[in-house]
Amino acid sequence: MARVVCPGSFDPVTNGHLDVIARAAALHDEVIVAVLINITKKSLFSTDERVEMLREVTKGLENVRVERFHGLLVNFCTANGINGIVKGLRAVSDFEYEMQMAQMNYRLAKIETLFVTTNPQYSFLSSSLVKEIATYGGDVEGLVPEPVLGRLRARLAEA
């Protein structure tokens, strides 16, 4: 069985993330979306909220499941029988960092990294940019899935 992981913080999940996840799901038997637990990073949404949102927006992809992880991604992969990591690349600037991580992951655990070029309509999109725009009242409709948009608006209204 070809099992891969799509890791990230997904704070919040964007339509670019969903595009990469859906494309990975079309090519592999199982895709595990792994949400990073990072207690040192200030997140807009808790890990549980991010997992819940991802489960909601990927429910139509039958071979996708959402989990959480902390520590080294290669340890998560080894523990779950995963032999591939799928990463989306938006620009050449992403490649340099991701290549370094891919080489280290291979050195540590012989886990391959597969790069998926981002759909051009999402090449500018990042969770950080979405949060920044939304925080200052900008319109992020069409950049995140509808359920995420509602939660994002509600969270920012609380602030």
Image (spheres, grey):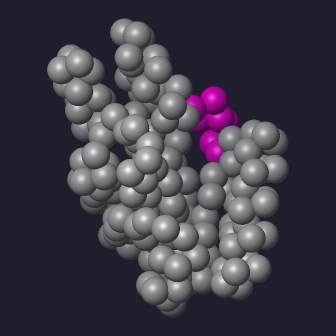
Image quadrant occupied by the C terminus: top left
Could you tell me if residue 28 is visible in this image?
no
Could you tell me if residue 30 is visible in this image?
yes
* Relative vertical location of residue 4 with respect to residue 79 in this rendering, above or below: above
The overriding secondary structure of the stretch rendered in magenta is loop
Q: Quadrant of residue 149?
A: top left
Q: Position of residue 117 (x, y in %)?
A: 70, 50
Of residues 35 and 54, the one drawn nearer to the viewer in this rendering: 35
Residue extending farthest to the front is 40
Q: Position of residue 23 (x, y in %)?
A: 55, 59
Q: In the rendered structure, which segment of residues is drawn in magenta?
A: 118-125
Q: Residue at x 31, y 52 (%)?
A: 47
- Count of marks, rendered view: 0
Left or right placement of residue 113 versus residue 125 in this view = right
Q: Position of residue 95 (x, y in %)?
A: 78, 50
Left or right placement of residue 127 versus residue 58 in this view = right
Of residues 37 and 67, the one drawn nearer to the viewer in this rendering: 37
Q: Residue at x 49, y 68 (%)?
A: 71
Left or right placement of residue 4 versus residue 43 in this view = right
Q: Is residue 121 magenta?
A: yes
Q: Is residue 32 magenta?
A: no
Q: Position of residue 137 (x, y in %)?
A: 37, 9
Q: Residue at x 44, y 47 (%)?
A: 40
Of residues 70 and 52, the one drawn nearer to the viewer in this rendering: 70
* Relative vertical location of residue 128 with respect to residue 158 in this rendering, above or below: below
Q: Residue at x 51, y 31 (%)?
A: 128
* Relative vertical location of residue 88 with respect to residue 128 in this rendering, above or below: below
